[in-house]
Amino acid sequence: QVQLVESGGGMVQAGDSLRLSCAASGRTFSRLAMAWFRRAPGKEREFVAGISWNGGSTVYAESVTGRFTISRDNAKNTVYLQMNSLKPEDTAVYYCAGATGGMPTKRYYNYEYWGPGTQVTVSS
């Protein structure tokens, strides 16, 4: 079993940066594909970024490409999301998710493990 806990959310202004972290418990973290999803008020859950088990492969949503970077440190059981040039439309609850199989997908139903989420609010 893997438990995930996000941190690093907050309130920032447009153009600012934030780094989200997701700490995982359990010895299988290094074999999991990891991803970040988000849900804005009144909208469906949306894929943001994903990373393979060894960090060798990453995938991003078009809306964040060039602004967000996902990375992981398997020695620390942690995955990160560096968010630069934040926009008001990035406002959402951000969730960390983990999937067996090693390679990330954009489909939320492929992920077995989820954190409780962290709020990111970007003001204009």
Image (tube, rainbow, N blue to C red):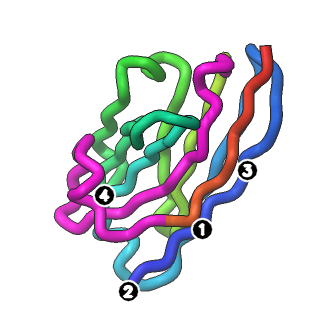
Name the residue at 41% across, 59% down: 97
Where is residue 88 drawn, in percent x and y? 67, 19
The residue labelled by disc 4 is: 33
Q: Residues within 10 Å of mark 3 (few under 14, many from 20)?
A: some
Type of the residue with mark 1:
Val
The residue labelled by disc 1 is: 5
Mark 3 and mark 1: Cα distance apart in space:
10 Å
**Callout 1: SS:** strand
Magenta stretch encompasses residue 51: no
- The disc placed on residue 1 is 2
Q: Quadrant of residue 89?
A: top right
Mark 4 or 1, closer to the camera: 1
Q: How many labels does the image show?
A: 4
| Magenta residues, start to end | 86-114
Mark 2 and mark 3: Cα distance apart in space:
24 Å
Mark 2 and mark 4: Cα distance apart in space:
15 Å
Say which label, 4 or 1, has the lower sequence index: 1
Mark 2 or 4, closer to the camera: 2
Magenta stretch encompasses residue 104: yes
Q: Give above or below for 76 relative to 25.
A: above
Along the line of sight, the residue nearer the viewer: 1 or 77: 1
